[in-house]
Amino acid sequence: MSGLTGADPWAVLRGATRARVALGRAGDGLPTSRLLEFRAAHAAARDAVHASLDVAALRGALRAAGVAADVVDGLVEVHSAAPDRATYLQRPDLGRRLADGTDLPAGECDLAIVIADGLSPRAVQDHAAGLVAAVLDRLAGWTVAPLVLAAQARVALGDPVGAALGARAVVVAIGERPGLSSADSLGLYMTFAPRPGRADSERNCISNVRPPHGLGYAEAAGTLVALLTAARELGASGVALKDEGPALPPGAG
């Protein structure tokens, strides 16, 4: 028993999660090391919200991830109705609408993919290229609209984008709101038959795409394509469509 003197009984739990658990205390407060960790995590979350997306670097990352050159070169950039980052953070409604005069190539396709900066451009910078490459690799037989990169965007911006492109489904890969344990989490939101006014209950979400601490690109892409296939057969997404895991049956609902 003498060998256990001074051992931290919470060390195993802390090693299994990035959540802030069993922080201990020093007198009436936190130990100095834990307080500094908290402040650093809080600063990282704030920085992630206010960061700018480097479009040129993202194009380069897409190429490096194996996305075809014509797809990268054909990437369409759009902007929400929020004119700047400060307005975007204060007016979520403007982030759900396209800026006046936005022109998108009308057509007819199975799927539109929107890469949106959201509340963590850092997440998009770090993970969008690998995720998009993994998704495109699994879409044999699908017609896909030109990739769209949306600035100052909320999830619902995918609805007018998908409708304008004539897409039967839209996927929005967006930087999620940073937390104190994750400032770089990417979320995927899939909506069947997108159009302005769709409710959040009509979408399916795959959250926390951020290897190695969250969902990997291949696993996220596999789940997304299974959901897309089932949504196409069912003719609906959201609460009407259940994610039954890796063996998601066609038309699950």
Image (cartoon, rainbow, N blue to C red):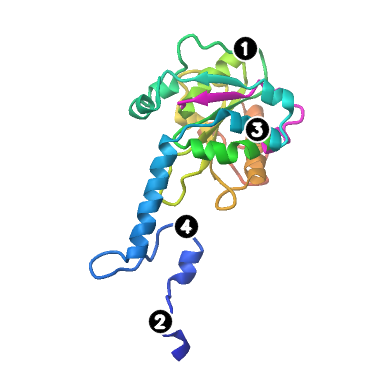
Instruction: List the single residue furthest toward the top.
Output: 101
149 left or right of 71 in image: left
Q: Which residue is mark 4?
A: 18
Q: Which residue is mark 1?
A: 105
> How many neighbours does mark 4 have within 10 angstroms: few (below 14), some (14-19), or many (20 or more)?
few
CA distance for labels 4 and 2 = 23 Å
Q: Quadrant of residue 134?
A: top right
Q: Which residue is mark 2?
A: 6
The C terminus - image quarter: top right
Q: Which residue is mark 3?
A: 60
The N terminus - image quarter: bottom left
Q: Is residue 190 magenta?
A: no
Residue nearest the viewer, comparing 151 with 156: 151
Marks 4 and 3 in Cβ contact (< 8 Å): no
Q: From the image, state whether disc 4 or disc 2 is nearer to you.
A: 2
Point out residue 19 in the picture as x, y percentages from the top left corner: 43, 57
